[in-house]
Amino acid sequence: IRVVKFLYYAELLKALTVELKKKPRIVIHAAAVSDYRLPTAAKGKIRSGLRELKLHLVPTEKIINRIKKLAPDVFLVGFKLEPKSGTGTLLRQADKLMQEARCDLVVANSLNADQYHGYTVCSDGTVSAALKSREAMSRHLTNTLKSLEG
């Protein structure tokens, strides 16, 4: 397993592009990057003492949506976190991610009252696991991905 660390959106995009050129078999894209960014960086210091500072943000491109375009044969695992969502909403959002990013598997997670609920959703829409802890999800995902090797 190769873990790629990053701090900023642009760093992740660059690192992912480099890694995908190496033709990995599996990509687990669990990165949560900001959904919005400034359209341009400030061209110097923003002086302190302002009564108010308004920022205009624009949406960032969903990096996961580029993975299959850059590496069509990779087995792509995406993650969808929907805090405080019910199972129906969570599974609908997982399906939406599956369609948009062409994932092969989506791990859909929710936290309700500090209780973890996780599901693995296959590309055919079937839910292959409903788990109650991150540890159980990690074991299930590891075993699922190991089975691809056999």
Image: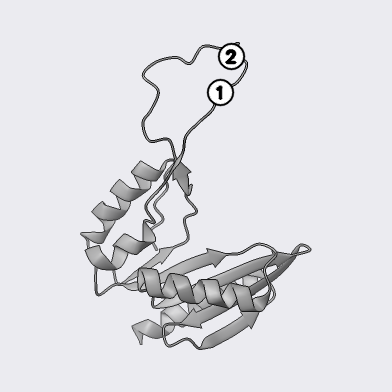
In 3D space, how far apart are the residues under numbered discs 1 and 2 (Cα atoms)?
Answer: 7 Å
What residue is at 53 percent from the left and 71 percent from the top? 93
Q: Residues within 10 Å of mark 1 (few under 14, many from 20)?
A: few
Q: Position of residue 142 (x, y in %)?
A: 49, 75
Residue, disc 1:
53
What residue is at 26 percent from the left and 60 percent from the top? 20
Q: Nearer the viewer, residue 72 or 58?
A: 58
- Asked if the residue at tag 2 contacts the one at tag 1, i.e. Cβ–Cβ closer than 8 Å, the answer is yes
Q: Is residue 65 above or below residue 9?
A: below
Q: Residues within 10 Å of mark 2 (few under 14, many from 20)?
A: few
Q: Position of residue 146 (x, y in %)?
A: 42, 80
- Does the image show residue 76? yes
Dot 2: element: loop
Q: Nearer the viewer, residue 64 or 52?
A: 52
Q: Is residue 32 above or below residue 108?
A: above
What residue is at 48 percent from the left and 47 percent from the top? 34
Which amino acid, by three-letter code, is at mark 2?
Leu
Q: Is residue 147 above or below residue 93?
A: below
Choose top left, top right, bottom left or bottom right for residue 71: bottom left
Residue, disc 2:
50
Side of 128 where 68 appears, left or right: left
- Identify the image quadrant of the N terminus: bottom left
Dot 1: element: loop
